[in-house]
Amino acid sequence: MANAVLHVADVHKSFGGLRALSDIDLQVMEGTTHAIIGPNGAGKSTLLNVCIGRIAPDTGAVVFDGQVITGKQPHEINQMGVVRVFQTPEIFPDLSLLHNVMVPAFAKRDGSFRLNALQVTSRQTAIREEAEHWLEDVGLYKQRETLAASLSRGDKRRLELAMGLVQHPRLLLLDEPTAGMSRHDTNSTIDLLRKFKERGMTKVIIEHDMHVVFSLADRVTVLAQGRIIADGKPDEVRGNPVVQEAYLGGAH
Amino acid sequence: MAILRNDLVRLALFALVILTMPIWLAPIGAAYPDLMQKIAIYGIFAIGFNILFGMTGYLSFGHAAFLGVGSYAAVWSFKLLTMSVIPAVLFAVVVAGLFAAVIGFVSLRRSGIYFSILTLAFAQMSYNLAYSVLTPITNGETGLQLALGDPRILDRAFTDAGSGIPPPNLLGEELSGLSGFFFCAALLILCFYLAMRIDRSPFGMMLKAIKSNQTRMAYTGFNTRPYTLAAFIISGMYAGLAGGLLAATDPLAGAERMQWTASGEVVLMTILGGVGTLVGPVVGAGVIKYFENIFSAFHEAKLHEAFSFLPDGLENFFVTITAPFVGEGWHLTLGVVFMLIVIFLPGGLMEGVRKIRNAFTRKPASREETGRLAPAE
Amino acid sequence: MGRPPADGMRLLHFPARGGNIMDQFVLQLLNGLDKGAAYALIALGLTLVFGTLGVVNFAHGALFMIGAFCAVVFSRLLQLETVTVDPEKLTPWGSPMEIRTPLVQAWLGDFGAFLVEWSVPLSILFAIPVMLFVGIAMERGLIRFFYRRTHAEQILVTFGLAIVLQEIVKANFGANPIPVATPPALSGSADVGTWIGLGSIYYPWWRLIYLGFALVVVGLVISFLRFTTYGMVVRAGMEDRQTVGFLGIDIQRRFTVVFAIAAVVAGVAGVMYTPIVPPNYNIGMDFLVLSFVVVVVGGMGSVSGAVLAGFLLGILQSFAAMNEIKNIIPGIDQVIIYLVAVVVLLTMPRGLLGRKGVMER
C-alpha cells in the first residue's frame, strides 16, 4: 500500500470572521493525482497556500514526507520538493523564457542560496539543456529568447508549468493549470501531466474543468464552504448527491 | 577565460575608450587629469550602484554614506599606516563593505519606498553624526586632513619623516596628474569587468529575477535575503572603493560627501546613462561630471566668445538666453536635462543610442520589404 | 554642496536658555509642537498627493519654498517707494531731504501703513491664487503624465523639477536668505508660563501664531476630506482608486484639485514660516527629506498619520536637543528622527497609521 506523501491534519483557518477552512483532514498518496474541486470560494486556493507556507493555519499542521512543514519558510518548503504552479501566472516578466525556466533549475541544483557570481550562465550547459527540454515539452521552445512579459495568458501558464516541472518536484500543486487555455492546449497539457503520472510524480490539482479532473485524477476531494463534503474515487464522487447539491444548489 | 568572446570584445573596447580619454577628451576641453579622475571614480560608484538598483531593483537613497566611509577609511590609512594607496584603497573597500553589511541587513527587511527611506535615514544619521559626536574620527566641518605629525607607522619604519607631508604613492611612484588618472582608470576597467561577470553569472540572473518578481523567487526555492544582501554589500564596496580613490587623489575627506544630495547624484548618473545597462552608469557619470566642470566654469564673456560668429544682435540674444544655464546656474541645466531624459527617454542615454542604432539598421530592412511588395502590383 | 548640515534639524529651534527643568520642559514642548506643525503641514500635502494620485512628489518642498517667496515678493511690492523731495528741509550735507514713502501708504494713508506692517499674513491672500496656479500647472503640465510610471521615475522627474524651480528662484533672488519682517504687533514674546501658572516663561508670539495657524489648516483639510461629499470621494479614491474610477467620477479633475490643495497648503505654510527663518532658495529641500520621513513614519497615504507623525517627531526632536538628554546619549539630537523612523518601519511595516498593500511593490 502506498503511503501518504502529504498529510493535511485538522487544519482550520479563518480570515476575520470568515471561516475559510475548517476541519480539513486530507491525505495524498504517493504517486497519485489528487483533484480538489468545489464551487468558487470553497477554500481550494487557501488550502494550497497553507501547503506552500504562504498562509499559516490557525490550528492544525501540514506534514510532508513525515516532516511538519507548517511554520517553515516558503523557500524551505520548495527545497523539500513541494512546488506550486499558480493560478494567476507568477513568472519573471523581464527575463527570457529560457531564463524563466533556468532560474528554478538552479534552485534545484544549487539550493536556496549560492554566491556563484563568477560562473557564466551561458556555459551552464546541463541546466540550459534541461530548461530547453521542458520548454519543448510545453511547446514554447521556439520563443525561448523572447521576454516572458510578451506571452499570452495561456502561454504564461504553460511557461509556469515548465518552471514547476524543471524542479522534478516530489509533490506538484497545480492551481487550475488549464484555465485560459484553448481546448487543444488543454489536451496537450493533460497528456503532459499524464506522462508524469506514469513516472510516479505526486500531484494535487485544483480544477474547474471536469474533463481535466476525470482524465487525470485517481482521487477527488470536494470542498464547499471550507469543509470537505466528499472524498473518494472519481466515479464515486460523481454520483454523490451531496456533491451535486453543492455544485448545483449551493452555487446558486 | 570563462567569459564569452563578445564580452571580451566589449571589455577591450571599454578599456580602450577609457584609457584614451586624455586624447579624445582634449578637443572638448576636458582632458585635464582632475576631471578625468572624477569621471573614472564616479563611474565606479555608478557601476556599483547599478548592481543594486539596476539589477536587483532596490533604490537606495543613502549610497553616498558608503562613499564617505570609504574616504574616511582611506585617509585614516594614510595617517596611521602609510602613504601607499594600495592599503588605503583596500581598507576603504573593506570598511565600506562591513558598514554596508550592517545597514543592508536592517534595511533589506523592507522593500520599495520603505527601503529607500530606511537607507536615506541611515545615511542622514551618518552624515549628522559625522558633523557632531564623531568629530574625533571625522574632524567635523573642517574635514579629515593629513598632518605633519601623523604617525604613518609603516612609512616611518623604513624612511625618516621628510620636511613636508608626502603625497600618496603607488609602489613608490607619486600619484598625481596623469598617473593618478591611469590608476583610477585601471580600477574602473577592473570594476567594469567584475560587474560584467556578475551580470553574466547565475548570481546575476537571480538578482534580475528578484527585481522582476521577488515573491515568486521564494516559491521557486530561493532565500532572497542573502542575494539582496550580497548585492547590497557588493555595491557598498564599489562605493567604498570610489570614496577611497577620491581620498587617494586628494587626501581629504569631508562629511558633505555623505549628504543625501550626493546620494541623489549617483541615482541621477545611473538613470541618465541607463538603468540596468553595464556601460550606461559610466556614461551618466561622465556626462554629469563633464557638465559640472565645464558648464560651471562658463561665464558671460566666454559665451560672447562662443557666439561671436553671429551678428551682434543675435549674439546678445543667444548670450542672454543661455547665460542662466551656465556658471552658477549649471544646476538649472542639470535639472532641465534630467526632466527631459526621464520624460522622453526613461531608458537613459543608452536607450537613445539603441534607438538610433535601430533606426539605422531598420531602414534597409524596410526598403527590402517594399521592394518585395513592388512586383506584386 | 559643501555647507554644514542645514536640514530641518537646525530649523525652527527657539533656544531655551537657563531656567529650571519645568520651564525647559514647557519651552521644549512648545518648540516641538512648532516643529511638528511645520512638518505636519508639508507632510500633509505630500501624503495626500501620494494617497490619491499615487505620485511621489519630490517637488513638494519646492512648493513650500515658492510659498515663502510669495511672502517676499508681496512685502517687496508693498514697500515700493515714492521719493519726494522736500525743499524746505535740508540734509546735513546741504542737499534737499528725500522722503521715501511706500506707495500704498502714499495712496491709502494709515491703512497703507497697516498693510505694510501686516504684509506676511496678508501674503496668504496673495499666495493662495499663486499656489493654485502653480499647483494646477504642475499637475496638468507634468505630474499627470507620470501616474502610471514607476515611483523611481516619479521621484526623478519631480526631483529635476525641484532643482529647476530652485535655480529659477536663486537666479532672481540670489542665494542669501531674505529676511521678512514679523508684524510689529506680534514681534514680541508671550508670557506662556503665567497662563499656565508656572511663573514667567516667554515664547515668541509669532511661533504661537504659527502653531495655531497650522492646527487650523490641518483641521480644515481633514474636515474637507471627512465632511464634504467631494472630500469623501477623494478619500474613497485613496482607499481604492480603481473602484472610484468605475463609479464614473471624473477622477482626473479631482486629482488636479487635490494636487492644487496640497500646493496651497505647502505654500501658505511657507508664507507663515518666513518670519521664523528667512527663506532662501534651498529651504524646501531642507524640509523635504524630513517630511518624507514623516510621511513614511505616519504611513504612506494616511493624512492623520502624517499629522500625528509630524507632531510626534517634532516633539521628540525638541526633547532630544535638551542638554539633560544630550549628556546621557551624545548626538541623539542629530539622529533621533531617523532612529525613530528606522524603529517604526521595522516594527510597524506600514508606519503608524498606514494601510495594507500601499507601496509594497
Image (cartoon, coloured by chain):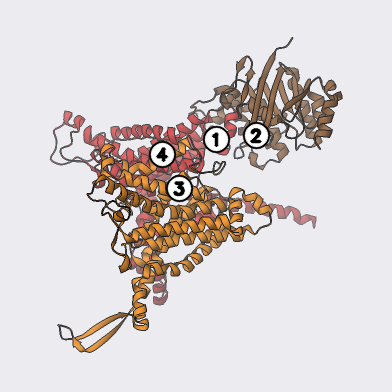
Foreground label between 4 and 2? 2
Three-letter code for the amino acid on which mark 2 is drawn: Gly
- Furthest toward the front, the residue is C197
The colour of chain C is orange
Three-letter code for the amino acid on which mark 4 is drawn: Ile
Q: CA distance from mark 4 to mark 1?
A: 27 Å
Q: Position of residue B99 (x, y in %)?
A: 36, 34
Q: Is residue C180 visible?
A: no
Q: CA distance from mark 2 to mark 1?
A: 35 Å
Q: Position of residue C232 (x, y in %)?
A: 60, 55
Three-letter code for the amino acid on which mark 1 is drawn: Ile
Q: Judging from the image, what secondary structure is the residue with disc 2 in?
A: loop
Three-letter code for the amino acid on which mark 3 is drawn: Leu
Q: Judging from the image, what secondary structure is the residue with disc 4 in?
A: helix
Chain ID of residue with mark 4: B
Q: How many marks?
A: 4
Q: Which residue is mark 1?
A: B210
**Image quadrant for the N terminus of chain A?**
top right
Rendered red, the chain in question is B
Tags 2 and 1 on a common chain: no
Q: Is residue C338 visible?
A: yes
Q: Residues within 10 Å of mark 2 (few under 14, many from 20)?
A: few
Q: Judging from the image, what secondary structure is the residue with disc 3 in?
A: helix
Nearer to us in this view, B35 or A235: A235
Q: Which residue is mark 3?
A: C308
